[in-house]
Amino acid sequence: MPAGDPQRVWFPEMIQKMRAEWHVGMSFTDLIELRDSLDSILREIRFTRGIHPPVFKCPACGHIGPGAEPKVSVRAVILSLARFQIAEAEHTKVLEREWAVYQKKNQLDLYGKAVDSPGALRYQEGL
C-alpha cells in the first residue's frame, strides 16, 4: 500500500512503537495508554502527510462524502500483536478474551474509555 493510502491504519512508526513498548504481562491500563499513544501517532501521520479519509457513497440515499477518520481500538492493538508477529497468536487470543471481560467489567468502550451510561455499553455490544 502506498504511504498515503486513505484506508491505511498501521504505519511503520506505530509498529515500531508497539515492538518497543509492548511486553507479556502488560496491564490493561498500560495497554490503553499504548493505544492512546498509537492513536495519537496515527492522527499526526495522517495530518502531516495530508491523508484524508476515503470517500464513500451511501447505498440508501446516494450521498457521497468522506468516511470517519480511522481510530485505533484496544482490540486492534491486541490483534496487531499477532499480525505483526510481536506476540504469539495463542497469546493474543487469550489476551483478547481477557480484554473483553475487563472491558465489560469496567464498562469501557472500544478505546478503553469509561462509558457514560450503561445503555451506551449495551449499544456497543449490540444488545
Image: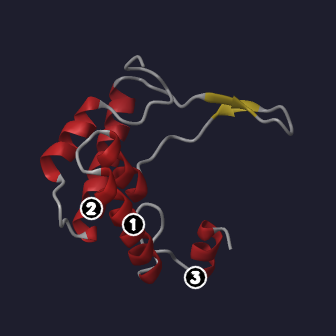
Given the image, on which type of amino acid does mark 2 rest?
Leu
Contact, CB < 8 Å: mark 1 with mark 2?
yes
What residue is at 29 percent from the left and 39 percent from the top? Answer: 84
In the displayed image of the protein, which residue is found farthest to the right?
Answer: 61
What residue is at 49 percent from the left and 26 percent from the top? Answer: 6
Given the image, on which type of amino acid does mark 3 rest?
Pro
Quarter placement of the N terminus: top left
Residue 73 picture quarter: bottom left
Q: Is residue 121 above or below residue 36?
A: below
Report how far apart the C-alphas of labels 1 and 3 lie in the structure.
Answer: 15 Å
Side of 115 relative to 20 (left or right): right
Q: Which residue is mark 2?
A: 31
Q: Secondary structure at mark 2?
A: helix
Disc 3: CA contacts within 10 A as few (<14), some (14-19) or many (>=20):
few
The image's mark for residue 35 is none
Quarter placement of the C terminus: bottom right
Q: Which residue is mark 1?
A: 112
Q: Position of residue 53 (x, y in %)?
A: 54, 31
Circle nearer the N terminus (1, 3): 1
Q: Is residue 105 above or below residue 103?
A: below
Circle nearer the N terminus (1, 2): 2
What residue is at 44 percent from the left and 70 percent from the top? Answer: 100
The image's mark for residue 118 is 3
Is residue 79 visible in the rendered structure shown here?
A: yes
